[in-house]
Amino acid sequence: MNPENKTVIITGASSGIGEATARRFYEAGSRVVLAARSADRLHALALELDNNWERVLVAPMDVSEKAAVQQLVDQTLQRFGSVDILINNAGRGLFAAVADMDEAKLHHLFDVNFFGPLYLIQAILPMMQAQGAGVIVNVSSIIGRVTIPTSGGYCATKFALGALTDTLRMELRSSGVKVVAVFPGATHTAFTANAMGTTRPRETPRGFAVQPDRVAQAILRGVQHESRDVYVTFTDRMFVTVGRMAPRLMDWLLPRVF
Ligand code: NJP
């Protein structure tokens, strides 16, 4: 889908990948709806993008609250009349060994990383189906396909999101609505600092982490080409391919790396 003159809802637009994605879509001519909890950061981004507020809408909200999600969609329809592209990007991390995982934190993680995207999809889908067009982008992770130690809870949310994404794509086969899964690897954002949990993974080996704008460009391309799966780097794609083909190798290797 050509994003020019299209309305795009981007969750997690106050920072990192979401913020970079908002910039890319705005530059591509989209009307961008900026959603996250930090109203001040969203306002600052909106002002920077569009002084006249013609193609931006600031929507402070929490994706884990179903009523807030519905309000976001209603507000967008009121202002721009349609939603053409949904980018489910808001997400949180949790670093803890399975044995020590705090149940309440894991519930919260599922609320943000899994139920948030689900609420948005359910709120938007009837309208996209009625218009016979739309693109839904779910931002997962390469560790939403292959797990690593101390990230089991986070991986579980992204594996669950992946299952939802793949199923939805099949269900929407002849509806005109496309479903894109994005699998970023390590990206220089506030993600690790914002993550819950007691442990922290080792520093990503030098040269493997990318800037958020690289992920944003991949998301934009994914929408333009209506891709099934989007990987940001060749290494990310290899990680997932090898991880799925040689799980025993990963069982041996990954505890030594992470
Ligand atoms: O992280 P960060 P990223 N309701 O912390 C928002 C995935 N990923 O950009 O609410 C609404 O800079 C939060 O805003 P605020 C990752 O899983 C990353 O790296 O104002 N919004 C902020 O805008 C996630 O799905 C890496 O605090 C909520 C945004 O989410 C996506 O990339 C690797 C919210 C998080 O921005 C973007 O993460 C990978 C809520 N309840 C996958 N809670 C990586 N960075 O290395 C949080 O494989 N947000």
Image: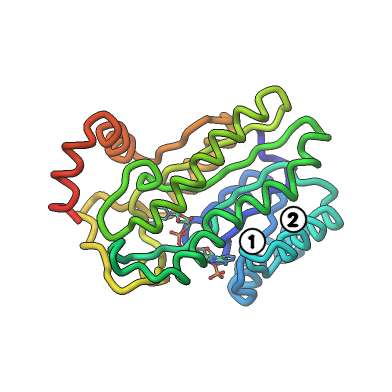
In the image, is residue 199 above or below residue 80?
below
Q: Residue at x 42, y 52 (%)?
A: 156
x then y, percent, for residue 177: 69, 32
Quarter of the picture containing the C terminus is bottom left
Position of 233 relative to 37 (above/below): above
Q: Dot 2 corresponds to which residue? A: 55
Extreme residue toward the bottom, this view: 40
> Residue at 68% of width from left, 52% of height from top?
120
Residue 52 or residue 62, whichever sits in front: 62
Type of amino acid under label 2: Arg
Query: Foreground residue, 43 or 200?
Result: 200
70 shown above or below 144: below
Q: Position of residue 33 (x, y in %)?
A: 69, 57
Residue at image location 78% in from the left, 30% down from the top: 132
Q: Is residue 208 left or right of residue 112?
A: left
Q: Which mark is residue 180?
A: none
Which residue bears the numbered disc 1? 49
The amino acid type found where label 1 is placed reads: Leu
Please provide percent x and percent y for residue 250: 20, 41
- State left or right for residue 188 relative to residue 116: left
Answer whether labels 2 and 1 touch (C-beta < 8 Å): yes
Colouring convention used in this rendered image of the protein: rainbow
Give the number of marks. 2
Q: Earlier in the sequence, mark 2 or mark 1?
A: 1
SS for dot 1 = helix
- In depth, the one of 31 and 171 nearer the eye is 171
Q: Is residue 101 left or right of residue 173?
A: left
